[in-house]
Image: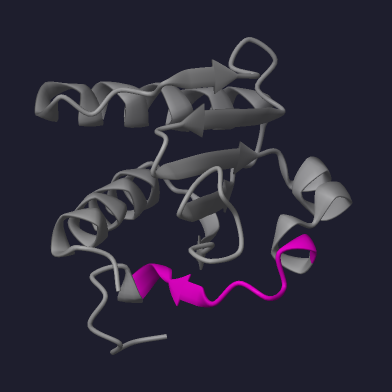
Amino acid sequence: MAEPGTFGVLSRVVDALLGRKAVDPVVLDLRGLCAATDYFVIVSGTSNAHVRGMAEYLVSALAPSGIEPHHVEGLAQGRWVLLDYVDFVVHVFHPELRDFYQLERLWGDAPVVAAGDADGTGAGG
């Protein structure tokens, strides 16, 4: 299990995105499946502007805690924004691209940590 701090940060990420009306949040536990990161946080927006706005808000919400992305892709277009925080990667999708790429299916072996379970307690679903 990841250290409690990781679950706290994941919970903050999901809460921040839900506060900006994120659609269908999913957290995938990639530990043991991927050497590049431990978790994927996947959400959808309803438009390019919504996707950009959620991504920009998340970056600004985490920055005061010293949590800044190592790498950002797709922000200008707003179709699929990738925020790489090393230990976790946030994917903010336009619904059409989320359906097309189907990361949840691609990483089907990864346990799902539901948005309501991002604290790691095992409750919720």
Q: Residue at x 61, y 64 (%)?
A: 33
Toward the left, the furthest residue is 65
* Residue 15 placement, left or right of 93: left
Residue at screen point 70% across, 15% down: 77
**Looking at the image, is 58 positioned above or below residue 38?**
above
For residue 94, above or below residue 114:
above
Q: Which residues are magenta?
A: 106-116
Q: Position of residue 96 (x, y in %)?
A: 82, 44
In the image, residue 14 sits, relative to residue 110, either above or below, namely above
Quadrant location of the N terminus in the rendered image: bottom left
Q: Position of residue 28 (x, y in %)?
A: 53, 64
Residue occupying the far top of the picture: 76
Is residue 58 rendered magenta in the image? no
Q: In the depicted view, which residue is nearer to us: 5 or 18?
A: 5
Q: Position of residue 84 (x, y in %)?
A: 48, 31
Q: Quadrant of the C terminus?
A: bottom left
Q: Say left or right for 111 vs 120.
A: right
Residue at the limit of the structure toward the bottom, as seen here: 123
Q: Residue at x 66, y 26 (%)?
A: 48
**Count of marks, rendered view:** 0
Q: Is residue 87 above or below residue 109?
A: above
Extreme residue in the right direction: 100
Say whether residue 111 is magenta.
Answer: yes
Q: Residue at x 34, y 31 (%)?
A: 58
Depth check: give the residue in front, 94 or 46.
94
- Specify the color scheme: one colour
Question: x%, y% of residue 114?
Answer: 44, 74
